Image: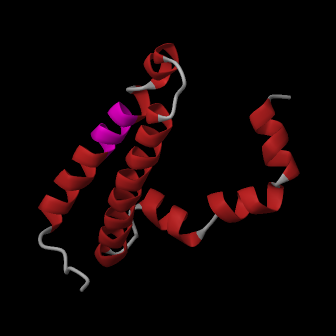
Amino acid sequence: MSFFERLKTAASAEWRAYTEHPFTHALADGSLTEAAFRHYLVQDYLFLIEFARAYALCVYKSPKLADMRRSGGRPLGHSRHRDESACEALRRLGPVARRS
C-alpha cells in the first residue's frame, strides 16, 4: 500500500468529506453557479499568490545554492500556469466586485 493510500485509509472520513463535497460534485458536473465558480477562482488566485510567497521564502532560506536549484522553479512555474488560467477565466466572466 502506498503512502498516499495509507493516508487516505487513516483519514477516510475526512477524505470522503473532501472528495464527496457538494461543491466538488457541482464543479465536476458543471452545475456550479457562476457566482460560486467566480468566488472559487478568486480564492484560488489569492491562495496562489500566498503559496508563491511562502515557497519563495523557503528558497530564500535554503542554506545552499544546490538546495535552491533543486526545487526553486517548479512550484512557481506550476503556480504561474494556474494563475494565467484563473485570470483568463475571470476575464471571460467579467468584472469582479472588490472588497473594501
Is 62 in front, or is 39?
Answer: 62
Viewer-side residue, 3 vs 58: 58
Determine the image quadrant of residue 89. bottom left
Q: Is residue 48 above or below residue 95?
A: above
State whether the magenta stretch is mostly helix, strand or loop: helix
Does 32 appear above or below 3?
Answer: below
Relative horizontal placement of residue 29, taking residue 7 as reference (left or right):
left
Q: Quadrant of the C terminus?
A: bottom left
> Residue drawn 52% across and 28% down?
62
Q: Is residue 78 above or below residue 92?
A: above
* Residue 99 percent across, percent down from the top left: 26, 83
Q: In this rendering, would 100 be left or right of 31?
A: left
- The image quadrant of residue 6 is top right
Residue at 45% across / 42% down in the picture?
57
Image color mode:
secondary structure
77 inside magenta stretch: yes
Residue 30 at x, y percent in the picture: 38, 62
- Between 87 and 15, the residue placed more toward the observer is 87
- Report the number of discs: 0
Q: Position of residue 85 (x, y in %)?
A: 25, 47
Q: Residue at x 19, y 80 (%)?
A: 97
- Depth check: 90 or 31 in front? 90
Image-based side of 77 in relation to 68, left or right = left
Q: Quadrant of the N terminus?
A: top right
Give the magenta-colored segment's residue range. 76-82
Farthest residue in the top direction?
Answer: 66
User: What residue is shown at x 37% (from left), y 75% (from top)?
Assistant: 36
- Which image quadrant is residue 20 in? bottom right
Residue 18: % across, % down? 65, 61
Residue, far bottom: 100
Q: Residue 44: within the magenta?
A: no
